[in-house]
Every structure is written in C-alpha cells, then in structure tokens.
Amino acid sequence: MPASAPKRLYIKTYGCQMNVYDSERMADVLAPLGYEATDTPQDADLVVLNTCHIREKATEKVYSELGQLRLMKAARGGAMTIAVAGCVAQAEGAEIMRRQPAVDLVVGPQSYHQLPELIARAHRARGERLACDFAAEEKFDALPKARRPGGVSAFLTVQEGCDKFCTFCVVPYTRGGEWSRPAEAIEAEARGLAAQGVREVTLLGQNVNAYRDADGIGLAGLARRLARIEGLERIRYTTSHPRDMDDDLIAAHGELPALMPYLHLPVQAGSDRILKAMNRGHTAEAYLRLVEKIRAARPDIALSGDFIVGFPGERDSDFEATLDLIRAVGYASAFSFKYSRRPGTPAAAMPGQVPEAVKSERLHRLQALITEQQGAFNAAQAGRTLAVLFEKLGRNRGDLVGRSPYLQAVHVKAPASLIGRIAQVRIAGAGKNSLAGEAVLETA
Ligand code: SAH
Ligand code: SF4
Ligand code: F3S
C-alpha cells in the first residue's frame, strides 16, 4: 500500500530487551504505511504501548499510562489510535478492552505482522480488534526482512518463549512455548545489520541458550556462524538459563574472540529449598560448579544475574544462602526484585507469602552486596587497557561513550570519527556504573 501523508507513530516500550526488538520491528512493519516515529504521544496518530507483565508494578503502569492517553485522545476529538501490544496484551487483552474503551486494538507478541490489518479494522470500527495467537514462526516469516538499525549495537531475537515454568513467572503464559528461528534467517538478518554499520549484535531469547533450530544448530553453532560475518565484531546473548548452559556453548567462550566475556546467568536464589519450590531444576551447588566450568574456559568472564527475594516460604536462613552464593560467585552486576505475586502462577497460591517489609529489608541487603561487588569489579579495571566499541557522543563536549568487553560503559575524550570502531583504551578511573578512559592507544 503506497503511503499518503506521513503519519506519526509513538511507541513506548516497557520490560525486557525482547520488547525493545519487537518495538523496532513494529516500526518496520508500519513504515510502508507512512508511519514515522515521533518522541511524544501528544501529536501522534498512532500510539503503541509495548507492555510488560512480569511484576505487578509493570502491569499497573500500563493502565495509568492508558488513563493519560485517553485524555489526550479526547482533547484531540478522538484523532488518535491507541494500540496495546506486548505481554499485558497477551495476558489480559480482553480486560484491557473492557477497562479502557479508548483502546482501539490489542495485539499479542506473536501477532505484530498483523498490525496493518488490525489498524485498518480499528479505523473501520468493526471486526476483530484483538490478536493474541501464538504463532512465532508465522510472525518472523511475515515481518519485513529489512531493518533500519539506529546504531552500532543491535538486538536480534533468535528464540521466543519458555517451557521452564518457574513457579513465579508469567513468561510461559505470555510468550508461549520455546521456539527457535532458523539459523539461516538469523544469519541473513545479521549480515544485513553488519552491512548497515552494526558492529555488535545481542542475540535475544527468553531462554536464549535453549536455542536449537530445526537443523539441530545450537547457540554455540549459531555464534560460530555469526562470528564469520565481515564487520560484525562482537556477539552477546541474553538471557540464559543455567540448565541450558551446555559444554559446546562453554567451549565457544574459550575459542571465539567475538563472543564477549560477559554472561547473564540468573540463579534467582541460593537456597536449594527455594530453588526447588521455584522449579528452577538445579541446586545452588550445581550453579557454582557451572560457574567454575565457565571460568575455566574463559577466566576473565564477567557474570551477572537476577535475584528474587521474598519468594513464598523464604526464611532468613534461605536468604542468607542467597547472600552466600553471591559472595561465592562475585558478580559484575545483577538485577534484583521483590517477589511479586502473579495471578495464575503456582507460587501465587503457595503458603508462607513473605511480608512486604521483610522483602524490602532483604532486597536492601542484597543490593548493598551487589553494589559492593560491582564497584570492586569496575575498580579492578583501572590501569588495564580494554578494547572499547564506541557507540555514541557523550554528554560532555568531546566525549564519546563506548562499551568494554564486560559491558561497562566507558567515557573517553575522543573524536567522533571513532563511533562504530573499536579502540584500545587505557582505563584511568572507575565509578559505580561506568569507567573513564584516559587515552585511545590504537585502533583495531
Ligand atoms: N528467562 C529469564 C527471566 C525472564 S524475567 C530467566 O529465566 O532468567 C526476568 C527476571 O524477572 C527474572 O529472572 C526474575 O528475576 C524476575 N521475575 C520474574 N517473575 C517475577 C516475579 N513474579 N516477581 C519478581 N521478580 C520476577
Ligand atoms: Fe520465567 Fe523461568 Fe522461563 Fe525464565 S526460565 S522466563 S524465569 S519461567
Ligand atoms: Fe516483561 Fe514479557 Fe519481557 S513479561 S520481561 S516484556 S517477556
């Protein structure tokens, strides 16, 4: 369909990186209809909220945002189409339509290729305005092949869904079962990105290391294929499950220079009793042994994790076991959350729900420990020379911001011509969240 007058599109993204990728792809689907991105909802013809269902707060945000959008839409005499996408759309699409009549359409994560049709139906004000089927394969086949990456580093979804059913988690219900894209399609997408100046890809999946395509290619095999692409210097992936961290992938960390020495490997808790109740499928000891194995293959690898405090039945001693595990591993960074009760998940109905005050106190203590470890990890880089991939201009004049192999932000005084290139940088100082580079020694 040829574009008429340009229409303005505002997409707001909540949640994980997979939503960030999906939002980019929605923009790609809508571009041929004449939609151009705008960064405020006020003047947008189409507003898309790409939502997250993972914790109660994330879900609440959506309804309050919709309340504000309703007023904006009314002030413009209704000349605004409001779409709700993402995991809240999938989980409670019908309820969204009921609770907020200003919403024109609801589209689940596997149905973004249907957006043009859904928008047309919404404008005709008839027909089905809710699309929430699970059809990952169909989606990827139907999405436009061409992407318009905005920068040096890009996300690339390789796997969707989850079969693990951790008892606290909504993802298996919002994203469906595990499904992997064919390696060939991923390689083609990565080549296209590299040709447009992308130097780093982060492969995404709810269980990215469970990746295995119909030809039996696993994540290690995929990484080896991508590492051969001209211009693609760095490969990362997230999020991994300890149970899917196989020997081949561990070996790849030792053998592929392009595979960056940073691994997000959530463990959630350090008490076997809680791990069992969470249905994580491994013990604390097994996780520690796994970390040892990974470090044997790639000694400098930086580890990060996710933690939940206050899971039902968590006692002081269980929480102490989590702190012990954190001390034993030594993380470069971590995300931590108070357990949030999600309707329909097994843990929501478990006895021994932990009082909010106890959760807050535990979260505070856990975060203090992580902050300490993160500070120590950053401080240990001072005096070293690191390969930095420069991504963009910094906030101060003459500053560039790049990333170390360990995903740390590095601020350096350097010419803008270095953006998109990797240079050796001497690290002069370290802060809580970033490093300061002193001099660019040579370009690679
Ligand atoms: N697939 C990833 C996690 C996806 S969700 C994995 O298994 O590691 C991201 C993080 O949100 C989880 O690792 C967990 O720490 C947190 N999370 C998920 N459900 C939660 C809940 N009900 N309450 C609090 N945190 C939760
Ligand atoms: Fe959720 Fe567990 Fe699946 Fe991760 S592995 S998405 S925490 S069910
Ligand atoms: Fe949230 Fe869905 Fe991602 S629930 S964390 S947006 S998979």
Image (tube, grey):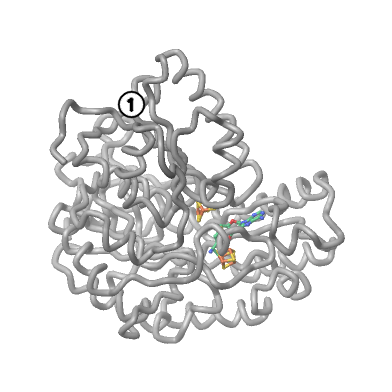
Left or right of 186 on screen, residue 110: right
Q: Residue at x 50, y 47 (%)?
A: 15
Assess mark 1: CB under 8 A from ligand 3?
no
Quadrant placement of the N terminus: top left
Q: Is residue 178 left or right of residue 415?
A: right
**Above or below: residue 248 compared with residue 126:** below
Which residue is the site of mark 1? 45
Residue 258 location, x and y as percent?
A: 28, 69
- Examine the image and state in which quarter residue 185 appears: bottom left
Report x, y in % for residue 297: 42, 82
Front-lying residue, 337 or 24: 24
Category of crowding for the residue at label 1, using alpha-carbon neighbours closer than 10 angstroms: few (below 14), some (14–19), many (at least 20): many
Residue 439 in view, yes or no: yes
Q: Amino acid at mark 1?
A: Asp
Using the image as rendered, state which of residue 407 and residue 153 is in the foreground.
153
Q: Percent x, y for residue 414? A: 22, 41
- Residue 85 vs 233, above or below: the answer is above
Residue closest to the eye, 214 or 412? 214
The image quadrant in which ligand 1 is located: bottom right
Residue at the image point whose x is 17% and y is 64% from the top? 191
Question: Residue at 13% across / 38% down in the picture?
Answer: 2
- The answer to whether 246 appears left or right of 166 in the picture is left
